[in-house]
Every structure is written in C-alpha cells, then in structure tokens.
Amino acid sequence: MTRCDLSLGFVGLGALGLPMAINLQREGLRLRVHTRSRRAETHPDLKDATPCSNPAAASAGVDVLLLCVSDDAAVEDVLFGPNGAASQLSAGSVVLDCSTIAPSTAQGCAERLAHQNVHYLDAPVTGGTEGAKRGSLTVLVGGASEPLERVRPILEVIGASIHHFGGVGRGQQVKAVNQVLVAGSYAAVAEAVALGQSLDLPMPQVINALKNGAAGSWALDHRSDAMLNGSYPLGFRLSLHRKDLDIALEAARAVQLDLPVTTLVEQLELDLINDGHGDEDVSALHRWNHPKEGR
C-alpha cells in the first residue's frame, strides 16, 4: 500500500502537529483534521483537508489515526472521552500516537483498542519544530511489526529516521531517555552561555569555535542564539518538557535508579513555570542565571 492509498485522521495541530500535517497533505494524503482550539484546522496549507468538530469525526472511515497531543489525559480523552475516536475507528485500523506519554498509558490504550481489533503504536518524535517542518524528525516506535509496516509510508513523510524498539511502550521509554539527555544539554548550554556573558566574552564567536568540538550539541547549535538574545520563541514548550521529565523520573524510580541531574533540571523548570515562563521554549532555562530577564 502506498501513502496515497491511506486515508488519515490527524488530531492535534500544535507546534509539532501542524507542520507534520502540512507535510502529509503535500504528499497527497487525504486528511481529516481536528485540534482542540479549532483554529489550525483552517490553516492555508491545510486547505484540502477536512476540518472535523471532534476526534470521532476525524476518525470516521480512516485507515490511520495520528495523534500529536500534549499529555496522557489528552490522549485518553481523544480516544475514549465524549466524541472520542474509539467510537468510530474501524476494525483493522491503526492509531499512530506521536504524543509523549507514560509507557503504562500507551499500554493501557493499546489494550483497550485491541478489544475492537484496532492496532496502537506509540511513536513519540524528537527533533523539535525545525525537524517537524523539514520532515526530518526521529521517530521512536513501540508496537507490533505488521501495523508499523502499514504506516511506514506516513512515518517516512514526517521523519528521516524511524526506529522500532519492540512492544507498545518501548518507544515512550526511549523518548524518556531522550528527554533526560535534552535536560542535561539545555541546562549545560544555559550555564555555559551565562558564564561566557559574565566574563564579557564575544559569545557568538565562542559558540562558533566550540560547536564543532567536544562541547557540540543540538541545543548549542539551535538554542544558544535565543539564550544570547534573552528571547525564547517557542520550539518545545518548557511546561511540556517538565511533564516529560516527570515521566522519565517515574521510570527511573520504578527500577530504583537515581537521576540527580535530571531531578535538578526538573526543579529549575518547575520554578520557571511557577514564575510564568511555562509557555516559552526550554531554552528559557537561561533565565535562571539572568534574573533581570524575569526569573
């Protein structure tokens, strides 16, 4: 089956979901779309998609339902709440869940959907809004191989790299590992930038000198400018990353593992959220060392 043979429902047109949906439409897929605010459903680049009033309507008659929503509660509401998708999903269809949620939640959704012969794949993504726009996300998949192969043509549009790690929930476990790495790298870049600024170094030149050496990272390449400018336009929301760290720390507790660096970064993020910065990009961690920016 080619990608153009698949009919697709898409729920969740946020910072990642909207560019993903746009790329899928550009590849000729037939889309039924729904998002909680309803505004993005009529985006000019989705002019050929069918706006839907709720998840059930977005799921009617589709081969694949793709979710990209904020948290566990949102996934469960989209699937099983009032006007939920499960009421309309056909036997044999596939739910492709690109949200970041707890592995146990993913497994619970898979079990409930299996009663109506609907397949569920957890497929969280990483790569930021830049990757979503370019179609170069990394996709981390948990679930059975047969439905994965059916939806691979969709994944190849949104991602440049697709990795299968086993049963349902394993993709979410790998995403938790990813978010621990993100936490450490963003916090390190924030502190390094603050130190360089406090030493009155020419920081653009410093970053250019260091980014291809041992200190290089995605965060240094893509978020150091925001930190230097003291402006944090949304790439990945700080409040959502803190939610992801809570998932990672819970996974660590379940195997009696301490993650002291991650625990510290989660607390820094929580303090910033409590100060009103939860809707900024994760690079707002730089505010911790710059109280004049509003910490």
Image (cartoon, rainbow, N blue to C red):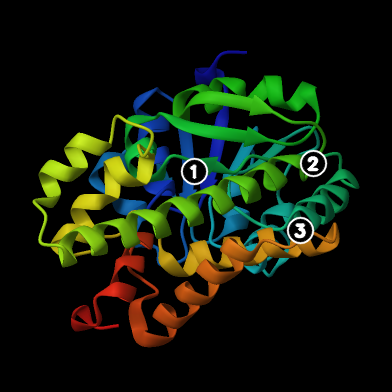
Picture disc at residue 32:
1
Secondary structure under the numbered disc 3 in the rendered image: helix
Which residue is located at x 25 percent, y 62 percent?
A: 195
**Where, by quadrant of the figure, is residue 50 drawn?**
top left
Q: Which mark is residue 251?
A: 3
Q: Taking 104 as reference, is 47 left or right?
A: left
Q: Which residue is rendered at x = 20% and y = 78% of the image?
A: 293
Label 2 vs label 3: CA separation?
15 Å
Asked whether residue 11 is in view, the answer is: yes
How many residues crowd mark 3 within 10 Å: few (<14), some (14–19), many (20+)?
A: some
Q: Position of residue 65 (x, y in %)?
A: 61, 42
Residue 67 appears at what percent x and percent y?
Answer: 58, 48
The image shows residue 85 at horizontal and vertical percentages of 67, 54
Q: Secondary structure at mark 2?
A: loop
In x, y percent, where is residue 1? 62, 13
Q: Is residue 22 above or below residue 57?
A: above
The residue tagged 2 is 168
